[in-house]
Image (cartoon, rainbow, N blue to C red):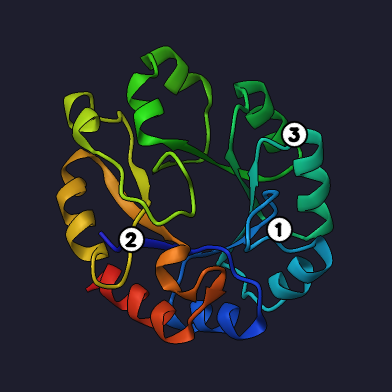
């Protein structure tokens, strides 16, 4: 199966173009407050306009309230929203009703502790498992996931780089990992994406 790849935290035309040309399946624009990668809706809209049909444009939000999420996503002309925070199944349903695909991002530790009825209730389009502090470049402990594996396919994030992605993904494929999401691992400095690292990452993830 072809590995699904999302390059997140993009903020310039050059890096968006590099992700598209490298074959990414999705590009992400950060609206979470306090991140060095945060951009405004006008910039996101200009960048999203460069992305061909068939590649997902994702707004990344953290604890901002579903009304704010949808307002920013509409203003940016995005196709999907990625929710990090305390969003509820009702919030996911609201985003769906507004016409957006939903990626639910949760720490691997929190997900491992969720009862099955909670996991099923969200009905997200994609599940992303990350470290406790998204964007910090940390790898999470996968032990609890092996003890109680996800009942669906999922996306891996946290601590991925061109050098580590193949090994980390290979080890987690047995419990359903089918794609990857990277941000800090393709940066030359904090918040600054590298065209060369983006290309190398996509190649390594698919290699």
Q: Which mark is residue 133?
A: none
Name the quarter where the C terminus is drawn.
bottom left
Q: SS class of the residue under badge 2?
A: loop
Q: CA distance from mark 1 to mark 3?
A: 15 Å
Q: Is residue 78 above or below residue 84?
A: below
Name which of mark 2 and mark 3 comes first in the sequence. Answer: 3
Q: CA distance from mark 2 to mark 3?
A: 29 Å
Q: Label 2 neighbourhood size at 10 Å, few (<14), some (14-19), many (20+)?
A: many
Name which of mark 1 and mark 3 comes first in the sequence. Answer: 3
Name which of mark 1 and mark 2 comes first in the sequence. Answer: 1
Q: Nearer the viewer, mark 2 or mark 3?
A: 2
For label 3, the residue is 66
Dot 1 and dot 3 residues touching (CB under 8 Å): no
Q: Label 3 neighbourhood size at 10 Å, few (<14), some (14-19), many (20+)?
A: some
Task: Using the image as rendered, state which of residue 72 and residue 159 is in the foreground.
Answer: 159
Image side of residue 139 versus residue 33, left or right: left
Q: Is residue 194 above or below residue 179?
A: below
For label 2, the residue is 160
For label 1, the residue is 78
Q: Residue at x 33, y 34 (%)?
A: 152
Task: Using the image as rendered, state which of residue 119 and residue 84 is in the foreground.
Answer: 84
Q: SS class of the residue under badge 3?
A: helix
Q: Nearer the viewer, mark 1 or mark 2?
A: 2
Image side of residue 188 versus residue 101, left or right: left
Q: SS class of the residue under badge 1?
A: loop
Q: Position of residue 144 (x, y in %)?
A: 23, 28
Q: Position of residue 20 (x, y in %)?
A: 52, 78
Q: Residue at x 63, y 63 (%)?
A: 37
């Amino acid at each position: 199966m072809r590995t699904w790849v999302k390059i997140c935290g993009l903020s310039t035309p050059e890096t968006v173009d590099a992700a598209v040309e490298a074959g990414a399946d999705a590009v992400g624009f950060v609206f979470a407050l306090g991140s060095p990668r945060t951009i405004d809706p006008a910039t996101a809209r200009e960048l999203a306009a460069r992305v061909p049909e068939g590649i997902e444009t994702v707004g990344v939000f953290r604890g901002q309230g579903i009304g704010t999420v949808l307002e920013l996503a509409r203003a940016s002309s995005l196709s999907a929203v990625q929710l990090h925070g305390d969003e509820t199944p009702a919030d996911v349903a609201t985003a769906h009703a507004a016409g957006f695909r939903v990626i639910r991002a949760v720490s691997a530790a929190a997900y491992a502790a969720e009862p099955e009825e909670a996991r099923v209730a969200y009905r997200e389009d994609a599940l992303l498992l990350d470290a406790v502090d998204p964007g910090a470049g940390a790898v999470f402990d996968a032990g609890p996931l092996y003890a109680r594996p996800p009942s669906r396919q999922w996306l891996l994030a946290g601590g991925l780089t061109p050098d580590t992605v193949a090994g980390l993904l290979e080890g987690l494929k047995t419990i359903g990992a089918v794609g990857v999401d990277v941000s800090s691992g393709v940066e030359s400095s904090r918040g600054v994406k590298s065209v060369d690292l983006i290309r190398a990452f996509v190649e390594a993830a698919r290699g």
